[in-house]
Amino acid sequence: HIVRSIPSNSFASPKLDVLFFHRQNELKRIQNDESTYLRDPNPVEPFQTWRETNDFNVETRKGEISQLLIDAPHVRALYARFVPAETSHVDFWARYYFRVHQLEEDEARRTKLIQRAHEICEKKNDDQDL
């Protein structure tokens, strides 16, 4: 997953900008954290289930991984340092992609909560206008 930038002429709402930048910061944190690549997530059961049910295969992500190694030199440096000395190629990427998967799930939940709060506020304002 590559950190993408928002175009300067973006008409995105400030709420969406905040969500984007939160996700971007969390992704950078995941990418820079050595434990992302060296330790299985705790608890390990969701990680194992994700690997089994998603049929995680680094071969199918080869292009995405290559692009990430080009765009994120810090990830490339960690990969060179840890594989194969401390972890396998497959485990390195499985751990990374699982944490990105968790981030995406968290962001989806956060977005729904914000949307719901916005709807409640709008309804409250509409009720006060009556």
Image (cartoon, rainbow, N blue to C red):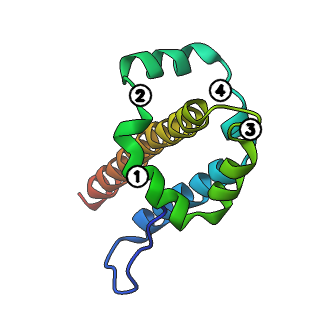
The residue singled out by tag 4 in the image is 41
Separation (CA) of disc 3 from disc 1:
21 Å
What x and y, as percent, mark residue 20? 46, 62
What x and y, as percent, mark residue 56? 41, 28
The residue singled out by tag 1 in the image is 64
Secondary structure category for the residue under label 1: helix
Q: Is residue 112 above or below residue 130?
A: above
Looking at the rendered structure, the kind of residue marked 1 is Glu
Secondary structure category for the residue under label 4: loop
The residue singled out by tag 2 in the image is 56
Separation (CA) of disc 2 from disc 3:
20 Å
Looking at the rendered structure, the kind of residue marked 2 is Phe
Mark 4 against mark 1, which lies toward the viewer? 1
Separation (CA) of disc 4 from disc 1:
22 Å
Mark 3 against mark 1, which lies toward the viewer? 1
What x and y, as percent, mark residue 55? 37, 23
Viewer-nearest residue: 71 or 18? 71
- Which circle's residue, 4 or 1, is located before the other in the chain? 4
**Pointer 3: residues within 10 angstroms few (<14), some, or many (20+)?**
some
